Amino acid sequence: MDFTFTEEQRMMATAVRELLDDVAAPAVLRAAAGAPELNEGPAAGGDDPQRWARLVELGLPGMLAPEVVGGLGLQDIDFVLVAEEVGRAALPENLVEHAGIAVPLLAACSAPRAQAWLTRAAAGEVRLAVGHPLNATVLGAAASDALLLFQGDEVHLVERAAATLQRQASVDRLRSLATVTWTPAAATLLAGGAEGAALRELAFARGAVVNAAQALGLAERMVRIAVDYASTRQQFGKPIGSYQALKHHMADVQVQLEYARPVVYAAAARLAEFAAGVSSGAGTAGATAATAPALLARLNAVVSGAKLMAMEAADLAGRKGLQLHGAMGYSWEVDLHFYVKRAWALAGSWGDRAWHQRRLESLVLDGVVTDDLAVLHHEHG
Amino acid sequence: MDFTFTEEQRMMATAVRELLDDVAAPAVLRAAAGAPELNEGPAAGGDDPQRWARLVELGLPGMLAPEVVGGLGLQDIDFVLVAEEVGRAALPENLVEHAGIAVPLLAACSAPRAQAWLTRAAAGEVRLAVGHPLNATVLGAAASDALLLFQGDEVHLVERAAATLQRQASVDRLRSLATVTWTPAAATLLAGGAEGAALRELAFARGAVVNAAQALGLAERMVRIAVDYASTRQQFGKPIGSYQALKHHMADVQVQLEYARPVVYAAAARLAEFAAGVSSGAGTAGATAATAPALLARLNAVVSGAKLMAMEAADLAGRKGLQLHGAMGYSWEVDLHFYVKRAWALAGSWGDRAWHQRRLESLVLDGVVTDDLAVLHHEHG
Amino acid sequence: MTVQLHYTPAQQAFRAEVRAWMEANVPREKLDTLEGAAGFAQHVAWERQLAGGRWGMVTWPEEYGGRGCTLVEWLIFEEEYYRAGAPLRANQNGIFLLGPTLMEFGTPEQKARYLPPMAAGEEMWAQAWSEPQAGSDMAAIRATATREGDDYVLRGHKIWSSRGTYADWAFGIFRTDPASDKHKGLSFILVPLRHPGVRVRGIPQLHGQTGFAEIFFEEARVPVANRLGGEGQGWNIAMATAGFERGLMLRSPARFQATARRLGELYRQNADRADGTVRAAVAKAWLQAEAYALNTYATATRLMAGGHIGAEASLNKIFWSELDLAMHAAAMSLLGARAELLPHAPAAAGVGDWLEGWIFAQSGPIYAGTNEIQRNIIAERVLGMPR
Amino acid sequence: MTVQLHYTPAQQAFRAEVRAWMEANVPREKLDTLEGAAGFAQHVAWERQLAGGRWGMVTWPEEYGGRGCTLVEWLIFEEEYYRAGAPLRANQNGIFLLGPTLMEFGTPEQKARYLPPMAAGEEMWAQAWSEPQAGSDMAAIRATATREGDDYVLRGHKIWSSRGTYADWAFGIFRTDPASDKHKGLSFILVPLRHPGVRVRGIPQLHGQTGFAEIFFEEARVPVANRLGGEGQGWNIAMATAGFERGLMLRSPARFQATARRLGELYRQNADRADGTVRAAVAKAWLQAEAYALNTYATATRLMAGGHIGAEASLNKIFWSELDLAMHAAAMSLLGARAELLPHAPAAAGVGDWLEGWIFAQSGPIYAGTNEIQRNIIAERVLGMPR
């Protein structure tokens, strides 16, 4: 039992933070978003090949790819801290879905075609987008070279040129969204049956967890912006941050955030274990056919819990942050809104609040012995 | 359209308040509740025949009885302000169910036996308790002369000696509760069939509304106690009421309270109209067979809304009041807890939160045209 | 007599008249947003059409273009207005805030000069209260009005002026006594916005539109006759205006009842993917909108009987702003993955208006005095807690 | 190595050992309430039974009656303790608060004198922090300890002393420098409660029981050796104790996980009458109890690696106290009309414990520093907002 990250994990996160503080600083986002009244936002959703190249230099696209294909051979529990940094920066590029969902999916897929794409995706030479039926749109489709798409239990890899994209404008201009029309074919099929279903389940769980991790970073960023503003803005002769009402707003956010954090990390740790089991063909480490459904239920409970709690923290951080800024918070001039809008956008992706709430309720309350669902103590009994 | 009370209505409420400030002052309740460690509370639930006599002097038991039987011939909209005062005082005697539910039920009942009891009940010579299936216990059964009890669509009047009571201790020692075992008989039957069902429906609606009205009074009392304490108690060199966090706690309660208030009053007004229709045999004033269900739905929606909002206000007032008092609030020594406990007790009576919430959701959301349910604007369309 | 929650035959006839006019006149197509130039012009045209039917401000006396209606009739008007899906009021700062202020504090000449074109939609008004260092702390005003003969010369910088970018006139407070501080020495002055020495700059908002503005006064000269009330009385008059803003008129219940109705429809369309908390939130929206309406009717009939609205107006501000946020949050939850889509996104398919409403709702707890300030007012002035 | 959410074989063996002992020893019948005289005596007997199995405080060194366990083992112990439905700890002020304080600040003699009987359940401890005018404002302490030779003479009035009515000893802070004010000049002193000049009066609580007390010191004389730490160091030591109180140990996650489990059972028994919001609340209780456990494991493994717990302990205090209230509120809602019944009411039929828990939960946001104070601490010391 050890719930601390290693020095290496922390160093990687710090390196990402330092890079993003530079290449995705608020002023950079502001320029990328274009003139306020544009309303359409930049056509590319702020996507910048030069910034992508910097992310590639750190090896981020291939973090979850095996070392044999040039990846870093790391796990979801390593990636969760990177996703948090991406959230903190409201990065325009779709790094998290490429590196956090698509690459490990290809790595776990037995099809030769998957392996061919994997090497190039891990190296960041090609970019991938993921279209899940629960999402209304596909993020980063326009900048992608290929899309991973699901049809029933089948997973398909469709080159972008073979799909028809229709651009969909988001309140967050730095998200490039599209709906995708495509035709499943034998040539696009990567996996089906039990393998396809397992890959789809894992992809969905990863989508929820990396979004939850981004929400942590977003919440922390919004709290920081609000606290800094509150320390300088004066009203009635003192900084507004000295008023108890505003202090308590921020303290409430901090409580939400700091209790969402370990749930997100636990979800990533459980995901890594479960994924290891799936790719080793064993269902999960040491699981038998009888225990596998319970392990999946437990994974799903903590994943939904992570998404719910992290999104709630980000939502609260946005609301309280806007409120603390007063009229300034409602203007385009402060940086806060870039992060607020990202949080709004992520809330509905990879299972919205109601979806995860319903799943959690069903897992925890309906017929399953609650005790078996404990995130931590499954060695019980 | 006039949503103001008359001078007479206000004067009656003031008279009740002045009486209760005297005969049910906090020190009186404290004495009636007995020694703190008693835990059982006083056997009679604090019931005091002398105080009952004072209530009778004001004509309160017969407020809703016709003048021909010696009552005041008033309506639910008049009684709602009295119930509010009873709540504010956390009166031990079961005046509201006697005068607000039992008496108008007898008045609307065609059975000769009902009329015989009505005259004496209106005069306060006998006391009545009401046992509704949704309540776990009967309030004031021990001090009653007879009980109104329901069995299917039948309404029975059972003399106390003919029923078996088992005392049930409440967290609010000044509520005398019992479960009642009884045998329905032809001799006890007051009404059945459509008449019985209508009387039962009205009794239930009245129970919810008079409890909601009591909750308003309780909330106001708790706010007043907390504000007074906050103005005198000093910490860090100033009154605690000058701290913004505590101010905002109380402001939040006040918002809840002041928006619950008109809903409770509207429920009472609609109830009075509906009751007038029932007792005139017309279903409701001007209603046809086709419109009566819509009128009932509208009444039920506002009654459930009133109970929900008023109880939420009282619950919040209790929590914030306790919090503001600090450790003192957790002690028996301050008066606050008499009102907090009454609010807890009323929350589950005459339909608990979940029951009213489910009914409201069902009425407003499921299949009924929402517009028809507007509390105010039913002349529309 | 007692509480009567029924409309009189005359009130019902009035409702029928409003309804008929709205059905015949409300634009079929949704107008562009009020916060952009094109949309503002469309909304001004609508104001003039309303005024043509003498519906600009029904409670005003006939001589100023109104109908002398009671507050209950005004509420009926609003119910029919929102029921018909009529556009937002570009004119609201004028008719709901400055109008009542003028009637209370204006000279006969001022009323005659300003009220009729306001009711007619010919002159649109903005407010000019806040300054960069005077937001919640409104008494920290620094903008000055220096008396020179029969004129005031205005200098200073106002900000967060709703409608400021497109309006014709603004009302605001200026320091007429340079030696004064805080609430003293301020005067309430009316200023044309297209005027020498007045420079208006739109401020982009969360949604990118620039309907609110900062206003720079660079030795702008206005006649002393543009002052409302006495010199140095500005604070009291502004407080009265702020009371109108928080109080009865700015956010009529019909607006929230209309949103609650639409939310109910959205719920029924998406009930299969809702959870129990959003179901509860939708029912609560209906209930709270009703509560807001009931409370407003209670206030209206009390005012009609000669009562006054005081600090309890702050209760209203908190209630409607939080209700509006809660209703739109429920809508966002019901829309799920589609919630982030702007109205013109093809996949938004008619639900994008909820996002616009959600963004607008964010401003509710902030403007017209933040809800923190309102809670202070409730605690201190309604409940009597120590300062 | 990375995050590992698995128990080692040794940890699993430890769990099995705890479980076996608890199954064999936990009283079958629920004890009377800890807040009454009879129940307190029952709980003291249980403490002695625990100590007999050397389970009094497993993290303590063996020489003081402990087992030298790690924090993770302590969490495992707690999980098994609450899983077995074992009684509340009458000894908690001693073992969780004073114990760690003594280990950090006590002399070898003090540790040897006080820790073994504490672990053995032979001496029960109360705290004596608050005074009538020093609640949240703890620095307003007026009780004095006047040096006379080798003794302190104590004068003053302490209040809200948990367990004070029945305990043997109390620890508290007293002003040793009469010229001092606020945080200075205070000393941390240990006082026997059945002692000349010490008068204890039980204060009836909401539920009528008198487990907490006020303590009057009327020239009570204790040796200077009863002072913990240096003279005038009382504030710093008390703050460390308060940190233990808010931090890791006082409310172990297992307690809330046990409540969440019971709440789940209550829900399943009453699901037909629940609404969607209470269903959501029950699921949230499970999730938040898990979150609290995960957060505690993270803190525990960080501390085991040499880290410290600072102002973030205030986050814990808020989280568990609000979680406890929310869980019991959900239970009250599920019980509906039965919620008001005391445990001994026949119709309470086994659900009356929820009412006791609900009443107790009311104290959570108040004691160990009100949640308002905790929010101030978070804002100022964790987030760095201005004072």
Image (cartoon, coloured by chain):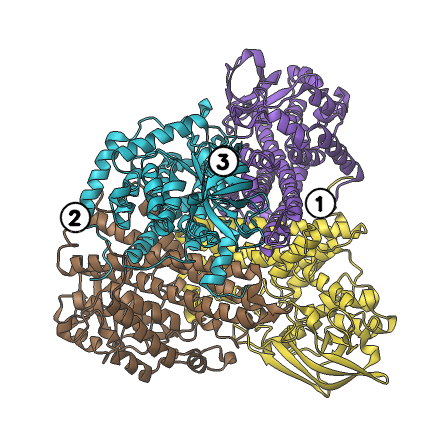
Chain colours: A brown, B purple, C yellow, D cyan
Numbered disc 2: secondary structure: helix
Q: Can residue B289 be seen in this view?
A: no
Above or below residue B175? Residue C192 is: below
Q: Position of residue C330 (x, y in %)?
A: 48, 56
Circles 2 and 1 in contact, beta carbons < 8 Å: no
Viewer-nearest residue: D167 or C114 = D167
Viewer-nearest residue: D230 or C179 = D230
Above or below residue A65? Residue B136 is: above
Please report, as a chain letter, where disc 3 is located: D
Q: Which numbered mark, 2 or 3, is in the foreground of this view? A: 3
- Amino acid at dot 1: His
Q: Can residue B189 be seen in this view?
A: yes
Circles 2 and 3 in contact, beta carbons < 8 Å: no
Question: Could you tell whether D19 is left or right of B129 in the image?
Answer: left
- Amino acid at dot 2: Pro
Tell me the CA gap for discs 2 and 3.
43 Å
Question: Mark 1 — residue?
Answer: C6
Q: In which quarter of the image is residue B102?
A: top right
Mark 1 vs mark 3: same chain?
Answer: no
Please report, as a chain letter, where disc 1 is located: C
Please tell me the numbered disc located at residue D9: 2
Q: Position of residue C69 (x, y in %)?
A: 78, 58
Tell me the CA gap for discs 2 and 1.
75 Å
Q: Residue furthest bottom?
A: C196
Please report, as a chain letter, where disc 2 is located: D
Circles 1 and 3 in contact, beta carbons < 8 Å: no
Q: Residue furthest front?
A: D149
Numbered disc 3: secondary structure: strand
Q: How crowded is mark 2: few (under 14 residues within 10 Å), some or many (20 or more)?
A: few
Q: How crowded is mark 1: few (under 14 residues within 10 Å), some or many (20 or more)?
A: some
Please tell me the numbered disc located at residue D212: 3
Mark 2 vs mark 1: same chain?
Answer: no
